[in-house]
Amino acid sequence: MRQTKYFLKTSKTVSEDEPTVNGRLLEQAGFVSKLMAGVYTYLPLGLRVLNNISKIVREEMNAVGASELLMPMLHPKEIWQTTGGWDNIDVLFKINSRTEKEYALGQSEEEVVTPLVLSRVQSYKDLPLAVYQIGWKFRDELRAKSGLLRGREFLMKDMYSFHVSQEDFDRFYAEAKQAYFKIFTRLGLTAKATEASGGSFSQKISYEFMVLTDAGEDDILYCETCDYCVNVEITELKSGASCPKSCGGLLTQGRASEVGNVFDLGQKYGKDFGLGFTDVGGNKQYPVMGCYGIGISRLMGVIAETMNDPKGILWPENVAPFKVHLIALPGKDAENVFSASDKLYAELIESGVEVLYDDRADTSAGEKFADSDLIGIPHRVIISQKTLADASVEHKKRNEDKSSLVSLDQVRQIL
């Protein structure tokens, strides 16, 4: 993509009403634009990041055998009344229609997915079954804050599984848990699975996947020796205590942001709707259900919050909006510099490399470098009069200080 044609504008100013690193950097670098607290426009750079995160999540959900669908965001009041959510979930957005009917904006999809799936399930032979979607959710947060970490409108992956027994749910949960860890690893994040209260979703213990960050909203205790981790709200343990797993480690308290969760919903939703399946003996049973969420837009915020330096964002390569930032420095030999840059740009695109090409003719080198660092694309390739004298380009990784000269013939081999 040529930068002169791209809808991209960086900013040197920092929003005074945005205390978090992710909120400031993402707006400055041209990834998002805040419409109001907790609601953002995702600009072209930001949309590419959301799509890259979604692609990784989608691949791992498909790998555990889940089927993707897309459910409505506008829900009739009646299905929320059936489950008790209409009166008991305080973050539910409610809408009055001109037809005097009432609706809810989806903050989760149990009320939609349960009758959808169970109307198509007759017997135990149809189970287990898992479906998921990647779609927008709405929550009436009293205080939307922390940039993309707590919003009123956000992009989420939510998966729902249906099982004939608790044992089969536990089996699938173990698979989903490992898939979650794969997702976070591919995104360059280290996540910890903590036990937490199920809240309004479930009366049982739920599991939350946390990433350590000062901008988080949860306090957790974790062991540096093993994988034990727990939310401070549901434990009597204190920082410095011995790990309950008897691994010899001590517990450390840290601030963290939730990036994913799983809830054991039990048989609640099937019973609420009176929908079940016929077991092997011909009797009606209600499925054990699970709900599995991952915040796609929240992950974008967490990555920006935790992966940055004083110059800007440090995107992991498989999340970054582009792999390469090609920068032309025309100087006194603009014709030859742009000719060589255009040629390399075309060759990289032809070979499948995603490139943002800074082809601005009237922008200083310093401003181009500052924009490049702020945006945080993993590879920077510079063509100038100086590099052309050696038939080379200057290559620098965003997370490294040193650059190197690479011949024009070899540059495609290192990208």
Image: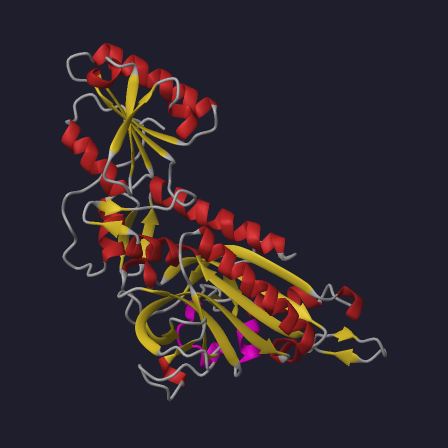
Q: Quadrant of residue 356?
A: top left
* Horizontal arrangement in the rendering, residue 192 relative to residue 60 (left or right): left
Question: Is 354 located above or below residue 269 in the figure?
Answer: above
Residue 187: x, y in percent? 43, 52
Name the quarter where the N terminus is drawn. Answer: top left
Residue 208 appears in which quarter of the rendering? bottom left
Residue at left offset 82%, top offset 80% = 283
Q: Residue 347, how many percent across, how many down? A: 42, 20
Above or below, comparing residue 393 to residue 23 in the picture: above
Q: Magenta residues?
A: 79-95
Farthest front residue in view = 248
Give left or right: position of 55 versus 354.
Answer: right
Image coordinates of residue 145 in percent, x first then y, are 27, 65
Q: Is residue 65 visible?
A: yes
In the image shown, does 148 or 96 lie closer to the viewer? 148
Q: Position of residue 359 (x, y in %)?
A: 27, 23
What residue lies at 37% left-to-right and 53% top-to-bottom? Answer: 300
The quadrant in which the C terminus is found is top left
The structure residue drawn at horizontal position 46% and vertical position 51%, both measured from the top left corner, is 186
In magenta stretch: residue 263: no
